Image (cartoon, rainbow, N blue to C red):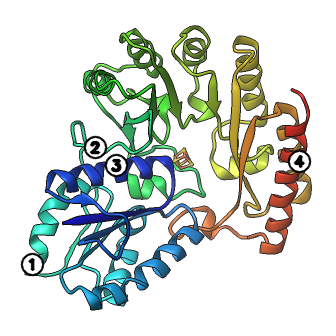
Amino acid sequence: MKYFIVTYGCQMNVHESEKIAGILEKLGYECGQSREEADIIVFNTCAIREGAEDRVLGNVGALKRLKKKNKNLIIAVCGCMTQKSKTAEYLLSTFPFIDIVIGTFNIPKLGDYIEAVKKGRQLELWEEGDIDEVLPYKRTSGENAWVNIMQGCNNFCTYCIVPYVKGREKSRQEENILAEVRAILSEGKYKKITLLGQNVNSYGKDLVPQVSFAKLLHDICKIEGDFVVSFMTSHPKDLTDDVIDAVANEEKIEKYIHLPAQSGNNRILRLMNRKYTREDYIKIIDKIKAKIPNCRLTSDFIVGFPTETEEEFEDTMSLVRYVHYDNIFAFMYSPREGTVASKMDGQVDDKVKHERVNKLLALEKELQKEVK
Ligand code: SF4
């Protein structure tokens, strides 16, 4: 019996697919090389951008042909896109050959849904679920091992669907994270541990007693072995001096911080509900540069947020010039149903968004040629 997983979206989803693979291998499935030879195909979807959703729909639709050839083929769709009940129902009604549609919290029970498929199609969306502490993972990123430290997000940036589909922040117990890191290192094949969370800087605030992200970093660095530690993603409002000091002083921590700014303009940052100003952001960057002179810096930007003017976009350009990042990821704003920003007046024309994203990426290219 073979499985084939198709993953969309961010690094957290890639790691989520490692969990799906681990569960399927425990059930006796082996990793297949193509959809054609698979007995089960799992689509692990993303809802962050419209384009990703359209691609899922197109690719799922194309499976009709395979299902015709192999009546026993199981097709499952899970992840952020299906967590939205409207989309889940749409998938089941539009594609009668899909067998399982489950949400982000139901993945640990994937085996039960596969078993139940014999009795009929499965649709289940839990509104919330416990954070998975110990699950089998089939790690697929070479010498790097991803370790999830928390799930969900409390920030409700007005453009973002994540808090609606991943729930509120839940941190894993520190001893379970440390045990997982020790177990990974004892295998002898991993040189890097990358800690994952939507907002790693607020790790541990929900634990009793609380544990800070800086403490977790220090405790991981105390584990014996030849490895580096990295983390993503940081929210500027929660990146504390303690964390910057940990990156500066702990030899095992990679000198790299991904710090999404999203915009360089205060009015747009306020509309985005980012809870920091351009000045706050620059202060953090200056601190990082002073304490960690060789630190690599990357960021995410959204252009064409509702009502963004040309002058406000220029503030983003000037921030990028000021920081001189090692790399940036620039996206055109895409309205996500159910978010506050999708209902805002003043949606920016697609043509303008294209021009702005191209301008920003051209600037980034220019800056990369210059010595920092
Ligand atoms: S911090 Fe904002 S952008 Fe990031 S996951 Fe949370 S709501 Fe989304």
Which amino acid, by three-letter code, is at mark 1? Lys
Residue 106 seen from this side: no
Tag shown at residue 18? 3
Mark 2 neighbour class, 10 Å CA radius: few under 14, some 14 to 19, many 20 or more: many
Residue drawn 89% across the image and 28% down it: 371
Q: Is residue 185 above or below residue 172?
A: above
In the picture of the structure, the residue carrying the numbered disc 2 is 137
Q: Position of residue 340 (x, y in %)?
A: 58, 62
Residue under label 1: 118
Looking at numbered disc 3 in the image, what kind of residue is underneath it? Answer: Glu
Q: Toward which corner of the image does residue 356 lie, by quadrant? A: bottom right
Residue at image location 36% in from the left, 63% down from the top: 5
Q: Residues within 10 Å of mark 1 (few under 14, many from 20)?
A: few
Q: Which residue is mark 4?
A: 363
Q: CA distance from mark 3 to mark 1?
A: 25 Å
Q: Which numbered disc, 4 or 2, marks the residue that appears first in the sequence?
A: 2
